[in-house]
Structure formats: structure tokens, C-alpha cells
Image: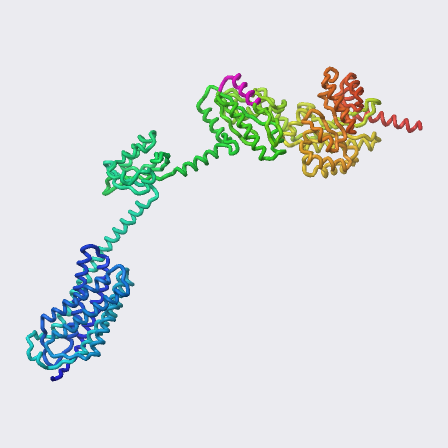
Amino acid sequence: MEHVHGSYDMELVIFSYIVAVLASYTVLDLVDKISNARGRYKGLWLLFGAIAMGMGIWSMHFVGMLAFSLTVPIAYDLSTVIQSVLVAIVASFAALYVVCRNALTWRQLLLAGALLATGISAMHYIGMAAMEIDITYRPVYVILSIVIAIVASIAALWLSFYFRQGTGSRKIWEKLGSGLIMGAAIVGMHYTGMQAAQFHLGMKSTLSTGMVLDQKFLAYFIIGGTMLTLGLSLFGIFISNRLTRKDTELLENEKWYRSLFENNQDGIITVDLNYRIKGFNSAITKLTGLSNEWFHNQTISSLYPLIVQEDQERTREFLLRSLGGEIQRYETVIVHQNGDNVNISVINVPVILDGKVVGNNIIARDITMEKQAKDRIEHQAYHDELTGMPNRRMFNQVLTQIIESKPKSFAVMVMDIDRFKMINDSLGHTYGDLFLQEMCERIQQSISGFQVILARMGGDEFTLLYENDNSDDITALAERIIRVIALPYRLKENDFYVTASIGIAQFPFDGVDAVQLLKNADTAMYEVKKNGKNGFQFYSHELNEHLQEKIELENDLRKAIPNDELFVYYQPQIRAEDSQMIGVEALVRWGHPTKGTISPGVFIPIAEETGMIYELGTWVLREACRQMKQWHDAGGPLIPISVNLSTQQFHQTHLIDYIKDILEETGLEPQYLELEITESMMMDPTISSHILNELTAYGIRISLDDFGTGYSSLSYLKLLPIHKLKIDRSFIRDITENDNDKAIVSTIISMAQYLKMDVIAEGIETKEQLDILMDNDCQKIQGYYFSRPLPADEVEDVFFAPLRLKEKRRLTDV
């Protein structure tokens, strides 16, 4: 057979590569479209893609064949050409079907690659068979072309699967690069297959019945048709992608909003203008306890029975307003299917389409926990934490509201517990709290049945508001409260007793506003305390005048020391058997510039209440020590001076140093200073014993003033370094007539003698009183019977000067 040689038209070869690249790119784009298609559209896109891919591969192959020119004209068998086209389309269909799955295993990839390679190889060699010329093949090149087809097919399928996801300019360039690689592989397979062919003039060429084609014209025609087809395919894909993207965006937005609706923690119900429930989420079923099935084909009116009766009509009104286009916010309570009440916060949001209200979204949130927390906070804000009773804030609010309601009359009581501080300080705050809780329970029981509001204002201060204008009823209530408070309290296995002081003010006689009423009731309460505690007092204008006078005195007292208005009187202390002076007591007086001399019984309590007692006591102690030192330097006699020590002075931090400084400043020796203390300072022996021991060690003598009138305890007489007991004048006053007073005085004198203490009686005014004391062996006396308190110069003239003269004569006689 005569061998026929051929040559290639390089222009057509290049065009064949371009066709291959364009077909590859189109395939990569089609894979993405086929993968995202659903239903019958997926089948249509798969068929369209297979045709486009098969025609693209076949066009590249046929153009490549036409690019090859033999020295003799070649005819083509049309039926065989059509077979090659069909083979390419079928192979492309199989490949696209595999690669458009959601998952692709390596086994599936290799199988699909082998099928596609078989199809391509079959298409190529069937197409070669369409040439009516004898052809022989070199096996090595045939095998190589098939290997290239397999590798190219696998690579194409993998790249198609890989690039079917994603958008954007980067993906476009990645697909274009992959198209160039796939095009080169397809072209490489084709021209390797052409290299395997050897053409001969033989029987087939002589019997040719096929069509002889103008190769160049046909090649360009096929190229143009193919590029137009693939271009239209790409344009169709572009348009479809745009539409699909919009559909996808709409679908995605719908999913987002659906997710927001379904997964919202708030319950949502959508209703139309006919009140039909159009939609609901799972949160509303949890909120109400109703099943999903219940909401189907229901109206919103079916939910009204779940709402508490008093809120149902109000809820209907809110729905009507929202259907009119207004957003409504409100709170209500529904009854869950399990019977629990659920507090909910509701927002009615109109659904507006094309400017018209077409329905309503009802959004409900469970605020039960928030409501309970808010109620707890509000309760804590208006109630006392310890007792649970109304506090100052709530009482003031209620009092103001009652006044604004313009009642006929009512009473406000201010109550303070006497001696509570002693319990709190001695037993500790824990027992103090237990005491207050028990006491409040008693008061609550005692006012049961009365129109009374009881509040704890803080500490041991309480207020009561009694809606009653009858003074007898108010009096009965105050007495009732005082009685129950006075009963013993069992704490730490001991009984403790307290009393109450109550001040009462009445509206509108004692004040027309809350501030004035409380102030006047407070004034009345302090009057009770001043008069011995354990009682009640109605406010009166006389009390107010007394208070005003007290305020004026307080202001004036602050100026008393700087203005040198204070002075000291001295009352001699006498030994009865020989009328010898054995000491003096310093007693402060106030020479007011307009009111004259004011008794210490008036201004000392004011000084104690205001804290001025420390400054006043310091001045008295310094002045008394200075005067006694002056008398000593003038010739005596060398007797001690007694000075009262206030509670505030006694409990100051540096008491010892403070007294030492005064003694060193005045030059008085410690043994000539006698400090008079009261029983109330002895309540805590652990503190008082340390102080008294230091004072005694320094040489100062301690006298216990007003013995028997306070909360006496004989134990501190044994434990504390006390040198002298002073019998109070309250026992002396009626000693000539009252056998009890006589017995008490006798007992005190005997006890002091047994304890080896000095004893002195004050307030002696008559010879009969003196005789009784002397009969009981009490020799030391202080009182008007011997001398009233005198200024320093009179003490000097009446007592000290005669003593010095007498002593001088005695020494002269010797």
C-alpha cells in the first residue's frame, strides 16, 4: 500500500486548542449550575451540559482532523461522524452526572474518569474511522493517547467538582486557568492519537462514497458554530446565575427570617385582619403550654381565656389599635396549662404591605423571673431587711399619701427602746437582732386588729401610724405596746428587760406635713426619756416652747466657755463628830448673760446630748485642780477635791494621759484628786476595771456617786478599786419618815464598812437626818445643813481662813 503523508495547518491547530479551552471553561461553569439545580431543572441542565460539553470536545477533535491535510482529497462517512458526536455527548452526560453529586469518592472519580476517557477515545477513533482512507495505527501512540485521555478525564472531573462552589473574580480566574490545562490535555490526547495514525491509499480510498469537504472552510465553520454555541451557553449560564443569585438571596433571606421567627426566644403569633392565626413559633407553645396542633385554624380570640380576667378587655383594645397601624406595648398575665401564672411583656407590631396594614405580629416575652426580681428589689427598698416591716422610705411615702387624702385626723407615734444599746453592746449584734425580731413580733401581735402601720426607722427607733382621731384609743394603744415590750426577753439563758419611750403627734393639730408631725412626735418622745423613760407623751405647744428654749440654751452653751461664763462652786464635806472639813466637791454653774445663773440640772443634759460635755468637763476638772492647788499653796488645809467625771470623759481613749496632763499643768498632787463616777460606767467591768486600776495606781481616789439609784451590781464593788460610796440624796430626803429609806441607808453604810470603803451621805438638810446617819455610824456628811455650795472666795473666808488661823495659834502656843 502506498503511504500518504500529510501536514498541519497551524492556524487551525491553534483554533482547535481555543475551542478545547472554551469547552473546558464552559464545562466548569455548567457543573456549578447543574449542581445547584433542583427537580426537573437539574435533568434539563444535565442534558444541556452534556450536549455542550460533547459538542465542544467533538468540535475540537473534528477541527483538529481538518487541520491535518493529506496529499489526496479525503471523503468522510457522515453516519460515522454522527456516531462520534453521539459518543461524545453520551460520555459527557455520564461524566457530568458523576461529578455533580454532593460527595465524590476516589473510586467514583476513577470510574467516571475511565468512562469519560473511553468515550473520548471512542469518539476520536470513530471519528478517524469516518475518513475514507486506509489507516493503520502504531500501538505505542494509541496506548499513550488513551493514557492521556484517562489522565485528562480524571483531572477534568476533579477540577469540575472542586470549582463547582464559590463565586467572585478569583473563582473565574481559577476556572480559566483550569480550562487552559484541560484544553491542553484534550488537545494533547487528540494529536497523540493523530500521531498514532498512518494513512495509505488502498481499497477504502478507491471505494469511497462519502462526502469530500472543503477542510479549511468547514473547519472555520465548525469553529464559529461551536464558539457561538459555547458563547451562548456561557451567556445563558451568566443570565441564569444572575437570576439564581437573586432567587438564592431571596431564599437565603427567607431562611434567615424564618430562622429568626422559629428560633426566637420570644413567643410570636401572626394574625391577619380577620384575627386568624397565620403563623406561630415553638416559643409560644412553651409560653402557653398549648400544642402545635392547637394553633392551627384558630383565631386570636381563642387565646383570650388564657389571659387573667381583669386584663382581657384591655388586651383586645391593644390588638385593635395595632391593627390600626400603631405599635402597642403592654404587660399582662396569662395562665399556663400547668396552672402557673406567667407574667409576659407584649409588643403588637402591625404588618404593613404596600402601605396597608394586613395583619399583626404579637411578640410575647416571659418576664416572670424579671418581675419576681423586681418585686424583691422593690420589697427590699421599702422594707426593713431584719424584721420585714416597712422601712423609713415606705413609712414616709404612706404618711405623705394619707396626708394628701385629707383625713379628719390620725396619730403618728415615734418609739425608742430604752436600754437596747446595753443589750446590743454586751451580748453582741447577733443577739441584738434576735431581740429586735422578737420585740417586733410582740408589737405586731399587740396592734393586730388596729388600723396601724408599724415601721422600723433604723436601730431601735420605730414609728407607728394610727388612723384614729380618738385620744382614748391612742392612749390605750400606746399603753398596750409599752406593756408587751416590758415583758422579759430570754437571751443567752438570762432574762433581759427593756422599756419603751413613745412620743405622739396628731394630725392636723401638731403638724400638717410629714416632717412636722415626725419632728413633734420625736420631741414628745425625748420628753418621756428625760422624765424617766418607760411611758408615752402627747406633743403639746408647751413642749415646743421647751424645745425652743433648749435649742437656744444649746447655742448659748457653745459660747459659754469662750465667753468665760462658767464658774465653779465648792460644797464642803464635813466630818460630823468634830465638824472638821475633810474635802470639797466642785460643782459647775453657768452665769448666763440674760437668764442669770443656770442650774447644772438644766445645761448638763444638753451638754451630754450635744457632745459638749467633754469640753465642759475638762474645763471644770482643770479649774477645780487649779483652785485646790492654790488653796494648798496658801496654807491648806491639805484636803482632796471631788470632781464628777462624765461618761464621755471616762470612755475617751487617752483618759489617763489626759488627767495626768491636767494634774501636771496645775501642780496638784494625785492623792488630792477624787473622781466621782456613776454606776452606768461600770456596766462593762472588763473595760472599767482597766481604767480604774490605772487611775488608782497613779494615786487618784475613786468615789461611786449616787450609789443605789442605778442598775446596781454588788459584783463590781468586789472587782473594782472603789474607795468611797456616796449615798444619794433621794434616800436621805425621807429618811426620817420612810423606814425603807432608813433600812437602805443603814445597809449601804454597813456594807461599805465591811468592804473597808469610806461612805459619805449627801443632801443632809436637817438635824434629824444627821442624827439618824450618825446613829448608823456615818460620820462624813455633805449638805445644806453644814453649807450650801459656795464660790471659792467664800470657802476661803468661811472655812479655810479660820482653820489656818486656828492652826497658827496652835503652833504659837506650842
**Does 88 sit above or below residue 296?**
below
Marker count (numbered): 0
Q: Position of residue 353 (x, y in %)?
A: 24, 42
Q: Position of residue 241 (x, y in %)?
A: 22, 58
Q: Position of residue 439 (x, y in %)?
A: 55, 28
**Does 570 sit above or below residue 192?**
above
Most common secondary structure along the magenta stretch: helix
The image quarter containing residue 763 is top right
User: On the rendered structure, is 23 left or right of 459?
Assistant: left
Q: Residue at x 7, y 77 (%)?
A: 208
Would residue 451 be seen by someone viewing this image from the given angle? yes
Give the quarter of the figure containing the C terminus.
top right
User: On the rendered structure, is 572 left or right of 207?
Assistant: right
Q: How is the image coloured?
A: rainbow
Judged from this view, the residue extending furthest toward the top is 737
**Does 717 sit above or below residue 143?**
above
Magenta span of residues: 468-483
Tell which of 23 and 18 is nearer to you.
23
Is residue 255 shown in magenta?
Answer: no
Q: Position of residue 152 (x, y in %)?
A: 24, 70
Is residue 477 shown in magenta?
Answer: yes
User: On the rendered structure, is 753 left or right of 561?
Assistant: right
Would residue 548 be seen by someone viewing this image from the given angle? no
User: On the rendered structure, is 102 left or right of 2?
Assistant: right
